[in-house]
Amino acid sequence: MDKEKTFDEAMKDLEGIVQKLEQGDVPLEEALDQFQEGINLSRYCKRIIEDAEKTVTRMVNEDSSEDIADS
């Protein structure tokens, strides 16, 4: 990936790769390249999701701490 993609862009690209590979008429070398790009996109999306989960968890924990302090 040359530039940072948004999650939606990466997912759209990944879906396109999956559809192309599912058709089965891709030459082996291209299929391997596409598969590798799909793996990279999958890992990228996973990192974005993990970061979002951490952010939400931190926000919830901060909110819970504030509720306890207010009591």
Image (tube, rainbow, N blue to C red):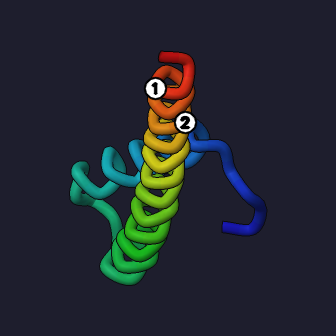
- Where is residue 28 drawn, in percent x and y? 31, 79
Tell me the quarter of the picture where residue 33 sits. bottom left
For the N terminus, the quadrant is bottom right
What residue appears at the point 48 percent right and 60 percent down from the top-left corner? 47
| Rendered view: 18 above or below 32 | above
What residue appears at the point 43 percent right and 68 percent down from the top-left corner? 34
Tell me the quarter of the picture where residue 29 sits. bottom left
As rendered, which of 12 and 50 lies closer to the eye? Answer: 50
- Secondary-structure class at tag 2: helix
The residue identified by callout 1 is 68
Residue density around tag 2, few if under 14, some if 14–19, many if 20 or more, within 10 Å: few
Q: Callout 1, which amino acid?
A: Ile
Q: On the rendered structure, is 62 left or right of 2?
A: left
As rendered, which of 63 and 11 lies closer to the eye? Answer: 63
- Where is residue 35 drawn, in percent x and y? 36, 70
Could you tell which of marks 1 and 2 lies nearer the N-terminus?
2
Q: Which mark is residue 34?
A: none
Tell me the quarter of the picture where residue 70 sits. top right
As rendered, which of 32 and 36 lies closer to the eye? Answer: 36
The residue identified by callout 2 is 62
Q: Callout 2, which amino acid?
A: Glu
What residue appears at the point 54 percent right and 27 percent down from the top-left corner? 69
As rendered, which of 19 and 54 lies closer to the eye? Answer: 54
